[in-house]
Amino acid sequence: MTTSPPSASARFDPVFRRILDAMAPTVRALVDGGNSAIFDHALHDRAMHESCRQAFAGLDVFTVGVTCPIEILEARERERGDRVLGRARGLAGVVHSFVQRDVMVDTGAMTTAACVSAILAAVDGR
């Protein structure tokens, strides 16, 4: 008997949604205060993308997409032991669907050093 891998989508209660909605504006406040920032954020739904888009309007934002094959995502999910199994599969088609990235790196095919080099080359090429 063959079973399908689990797939879970993200659902947020109102309290966690308020926290998510406050993240991008908080980063914007840090930048407006003269700070450089790297914001590591997976876009689980369109609302998260819109929050970022609105908060970062007028800024020179450089976006990096990080991906890898679903089998590797699922293995990492299991190895971590603190993840909802199926979340990687459920989000794989969503997190990159809202925005074009300045550069994409594949952590399944590239070493960490190669990913860093690709990101730096893309930043330098702007």
Image (cartoon, rainbow, N blue to C red):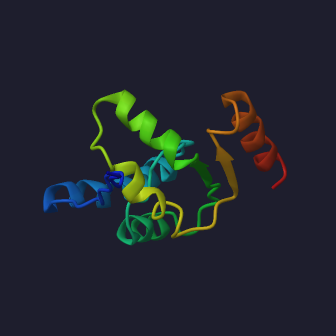
Tell whether 105 sits left or right of 79.
right
Tell whether 28 sits left or right of 99.
left
Residue 38 in sight from this viewpoint:
yes
Q: Nearer the viewer, residue 47 or 81?
A: 81
Q: Nearer the viewer, residue 93 or 63?
A: 93
Residue 24 in sight from this viewpoint:
no
Residue at the image point whose x is 29% and y is 56% from the top: 8
Tell whether 27 sits left or right of 101.
left
Residue at the image point whose x is 51% and y is 63% from the top: 56
Residue at the image point whose x is 20% and y is 54% from the top: 16
How many numbered marks appear? 0
The percent coordinates of residue 126 (x first, y second) are: 81, 55
- For this orientation, the residue located farthest to the right is 125
Tell me the quarter of the picture where residue 11 sits: bottom left
The percent coordinates of residue 47 (x first, y second) are: 36, 70
The percent coordinates of residue 103 (x first, y second) are: 70, 54
The percent coordinates of residue 88 (x first, y second) are: 40, 49
Is 78 placed above or below 60 here? above
Q: Nearer the viewer, residue 54 or 109?
A: 109
Residue at the image point whose x is 58% and y is 47% from the top: 66
Is 111 placed above or below 87 here? above
Tell whether 125 sits left or right of 37.
right
